[in-house]
Image (tube, rainbow, N blue to C red):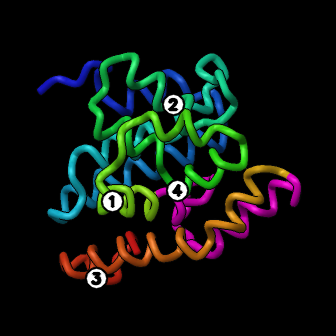
Amino acid sequence: MTQPLGDAPGVAARWLQATGDRWRHVQAVGQRAEALARDTCVVPATVTRAAWLHDIGYAPVLAETGFHPLDGARYLAGQGESDAVVALVAHHSGARYEADERGLAHELAALPDPNLDDLDMLTFLDLTTSPQGQVVTVEERLSEILSRYGEDDPVHRAVTRSRDELVASVERAKAALRSADVGTRLYL
């Protein structure tokens, strides 16, 4: 089936290639998802597509609310993207906590709900990839995110509130990968 927006890497490049580290991060997340999809039966095409598109809401021209999961998901839904991909983009990496902090919980709840196993996998990919595209631990990534935002920022408050849940999500994805015999490859 042909996707309405064309290939996900090309769509992501169109909107994010001029964003420096954001683009490096997205490329690494997308490439890791593709590699895992090739090597396992654990990463479906919807996760791979969402991995490339998860931060598309950072594109300045797409930013309506300033909350990238919501802005990206709304754009993708408006372009005819599948509900599965829209849901993953909307809800990735603890987005509901930040939506709550920003007063946007109702708007986020209006979008489709994701498959939770797929959401764990996307969260794993996102939160174990640094802004420069290196594989890092979830704790390193969360610490890096917190270091960029002051304690009064909604991102800082959301990550602080969701930290245990985010770590648990990453651990569930890692367990699924281990059960698929990925072992201790670069992916983990």
- Identify the image quadrant of residue 41: bottom left
Mark 1 residue crowding within 10 angstroms, few (<14) / some (14–19) / many (20+): few
Q: Indicate which label's residue lies in the foreground, 1 or 4.
A: 1
Name the one closer to the observer, 108 or 29: 108
Q: Could you tell which of marks 3 and 4 lies nearer the N-terminus?
A: 4
Please, what secondary structure does the residue beneath circle 2 have?
Answer: helix
Please name the residue shown 63% across and 16% down the image.
61
Mark 2: which amino acid?
A: Gly
Q: Looking at this rendering, what residue extends furthest in the left direction?
A: 1
Left or right? Give the position of 171 relative to 163: left
Label ID, residue 72: 2
- Kindly identify which residue carries mark 3: 183
Residue that badge 4 annotates: 93
* Cα distance between the residues tagged 1 and 4: 12 Å
Instruction: Tell me the residue at 33%/54% (across/down).
Output: 33
Three-letter code, disc 3: Gly
Dot in front, 3 or 4? 4
Q: Which residue is mark 1?
A: 116
Estimate the x, y position of residue 175 in percent, counting from the top left.
31, 80
